[in-house]
Amino acid sequence: MIELKTLHEIERRIILTLNGNTLTLDTLASKSGLNMDQIRRGIEWLRYKNLINLNEKKRRVIELDKKGLESLERGMPERILVNILKRLDNIRINELKKEFKLNEEFNAAIAYAKRKGWITIEDGKVRLLREDKSNDELLIERLKEGALSYDSLNNDELEGYEILKTRPDYIKENIIKDVEVSLSSNALNLLDKIEAMKEREIDVEATAPIIYSGRKHPLQDVIDEVREILVGLGFQEINGNYIQSSFWNFDILFTPQDHSAREMQDTFYIADRKSDEDLKNIAGRVAKIHKDGWNYKWDIEESRRLVLRTHTTAVTIRYLVDNKPEEGSVFSVGRVFRNEKLTYKHLAEFHQIEGIMIGKNLSLRDLMGLQREFYYKLGLKKVKFWPSYFPYTEPSLQSMVYFEKLGKWVELFGMGIFRPEVTAPAKIKNPVLAWGGGLERIAMIKYGLDDVRELYTNRLNWLRSVARCPL
Amino acid sequence: MPVVTLYANRLEKMLKRDMKSIIEMLPYIALDIEEEGEDYVKVEYNPNRPDFSSDYGIVRALKGLMDIEDGIADYKQRKSNLKIKVSKGLKIRPYIVSLLAKDGSLDEESIRQIISMQEDLHNGLGRRRKKISIGIHDYDKIKSPLIYTTAEPDTRFIPLGESREFRLDEIIKQHELGKRYGDIIPNTYPVIKDAKDSIISFPPIINSSLTQVSSTTKNLLVEITAIDLKRAEDALSILAITLHDAGFKIESVEIDYANKKIVTPNMSNRVMNVDLSYIRDIIGLELSEKEVIKALRRSRLDATIKNGKVRCMIPRYRFDIISDVDIAEEAAIGYGIYNLEPSYPLHKSSGNRDIKLKFIDNAREVMIGLGAIECINFDLISKELLHTIGLEYKYSVEHSKSNEHEILRPSIIPSLLQTLSINVHEPYPQIIFEIGKVFEDQEEYRLACIIASSDSNYNKIKSYLQAFLRGLRGIDAKTISSRHPLLKEGATASIIINERLGVIGEVKSDIVEAFKIRTNLSLFEISLDKLYHLSK
């Protein structure tokens, strides 16, 4: 049995309009106020639900042909003739013919005017008797609006039709198949209930067509979340170029020029280009620190080689050198590069977050506290710290964070206090607490990905389906 | 990072602790656990600690933190009668240092540990044997004294692992190690020969088979040749302490350079004086003098404190300690990182976002408001991709490990075409955009947007461009007919606001086909840097 709740508004209106009658689609449209497109759709649905019967019916239809249409415009030939006689009655037939203009129709006009009893011809002169509208003229006027069903003609019109049929090109006749609709017995039984249904009740439970919202990339969501946390913790955002000289990426950070991290197999060097930056006095101070600490002759040309930054620290240290703040907190989130083959856990380009805090009396325990606070705001409540090593920080730590979602500890950010070999040539006096690491791992855990490359594949079925604040 | 394999049976024997508590302690001497097996763990150690290149060094540090032994590790050496004469002709690799390790015995695993240490030192400190290379020999096969000199290319000896004699130049050209390391000693053939004129080593390439070490070897000769004497002595100190810990008696060797004689190894401790307050400030804790001394001893250093000055003794093999801050770190590690309570810094500052990045965030928001989906692609793309679409590039990288990452993209459009190409089975319309760096004339931020749909055309994309510019900047741009290698002639324009900011148009059908996309594409790309710097 049919579920009435699922009746569409169009279906409901069709049923109520039919209400025991049998109607053609046209009539149904005009009576229901629906357009033909809605009617066709509604009929299709109702037929499928066995609520209507469809019948095909043949019908004779007449409409005006070429001459009929001409007559509509200027009158039938005999009418034109009569109109002339109204001005010039009792004129000679050849003069009348001259006035008439349409030569080939003249004989027909005379013949029909006589037959209709409008004129008489005596001694070669034509005289007007009367000019009442004939039935064929009435029919032509009626057909002005378009085709008519033969069945709908009255007696006069039927007479007019018989006359016009004998004159070529005045009228044409077609057989048309009409579809007639009536309610099925099912529908008739339900009519009361359908009538009782509220107006405009639609199928509110059905799934609507799918559209997609515009969306920020899920990785950008993580980036923005982290940025918001850091701004909240009082950090100021900084930004810098991807292409850096080796000086800012390595040398100023006390990384010796023969360090393995600087080799081509780890770092992307830019082909055929070098930095021509004037490093002023700082180059000399860096040369001395490298000589004292690593026991070799520092080469300024090597420091001019351009690299794709291997860490955002290149941007941070430049900020410190340019601004020499006594205290402050800055951060950056940005892309960094390593010459790696892509695997499910390694990328050649990824995002790094890095923050520093500079100020008097800042200590290793402060750095640990800062880190713990940051993780806390990310919703990660359990943190532990291990010693680690980075060429430009001492002491150095790494942090392990417990992810409830995974039920395990995950290594996240590294951190440390900038070495005096870094801060002294940069003329920075107060301790600089620094920490940072890749963001992709957090994103992978957040979105449940096993393969880090997925973050950069841009599959639309994923991008379109990731909820912003999923349950 | 280099890896050391730690076997439970060896560690439990050396430390007299169970493996579980040993493993728990490993991270606190900065070792990363790479792999845990039934009877072993593999750990990565940091390049500043080459003394961790064998389990002996790791055990030495663990003894401190596990309160088994503290202070500077016990070490003794005697003088031997061995002399090595250095010939004047050695220009390229002029230095040699050496030691003897006597009356010991090595089981198979000990040999493996020492060979693995030797390889790590070659690669790390030695920079792939360029700066130093190490030879370890069965001393009983050698007749002293030795000479370090150069030889003729046609000199012959049987290299380690071979069964016939090779000429020196033959080794360089044909032997695997010769091919790998030959460049370090161009056109010269340094050799170490004994009193019987037998070649025992052809550094930095290979030893002689004559002096091969086995599990029956009792007495070892270690020689290190180098271009840097300090580095050679650094490496030798690690071998000395390690072989000492492995049960050998270490004896020094006299090296006779033409102008001076030195005795190696020199294992004397260094002294560094550090302010006690500095250590306290770095850690952020008012440690007592006793605590600081104990912490440093647990890190296998030694110290006394007088008048606020810490006099710290550092064993020779801890040459990674160069500044006061390194002592502070040793104190922190010795105190136990697990004992440090984090404290949130009392530091006033107000945070804010970068102004330009905020602008870019706004650009992103407008695009999302237009219903577009953001994509993130790599900045490095393949030459092939650019070739497919006929775009030029100006920035490339050297020696990329993958041909997918050779070129710094001169435009975002190729990346987005690739994105559409992998999404041909997803419902259309697809309206995607990306904000990112491009490297055309210089590094700049751009935005690109592509509409992929059956009704995508110039007018449609221009509506989006208009809406974007009005939504972001409240302005309109002129679009003036132009040409672009990717875009249809007659349906391409430059975006102009005072100057040229970008391009807009319909994508040529052969490009669309090249990416196997079966609908129409129209796009625009615009410089966000230029849009940012616009002024009224």
Image: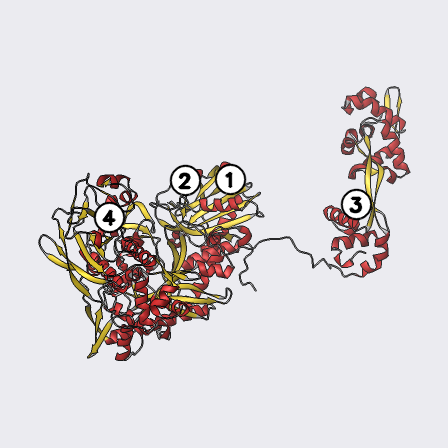
Q: For mark 3, give the secondary structure.
A: helix
Of the numbered discs 4 and 1, the one sitting upstream in the chain is 4
Q: Whole-Å distance between the Cαs marked 4 and 1?
A: 69 Å
Determine which residue is flagged by label 4.
B210
Mark 2 vs mark 3: in front: 2
Disc 2: which chain?
A: B
Q: Element under label 2? A: loop
How far across and down, in percent of the image, does residue A418 sit?
A: 29, 65
The residue carrying mark 1 is: B512
Frontmost residue, B464 versus A467: A467
State the CA–CA distance, disc 2 to disc 3. Answer: 60 Å
Callouts 4 and 2 on one subunit? yes
Question: Which chain is mark 1 on?
Answer: B
Q: CA distance from mark 3 to mark 4?
A: 108 Å
The quadrant in which residue B319 appears is bottom left
The kind of residue on which mark 3 rests is Leu
**Which residue is the site of mark 3?**
A25
Taking the image as drawn, is residue A398 in sight?
yes
Q: Nearer the viewer, residue A56 or A256?
A: A256
- Is label 1 or label 3 in front? 1
Residue marked by disc 2: B391
**Residue A58 place in picture, x, y as percent:** 85, 38
Labels 3, 4: one chain: no
Chain of the residue where label 4 is placed in the rendered structure: B
Which circle's residue, 1 or 2, is located before the other in the chain? 2
Q: Tell me if residue A275 comes above or below residue B171 in the rendering.
A: below
Q: Amino acid at mark 2?
A: Leu
Identify whether A316 is placed above or below B380.
Answer: below
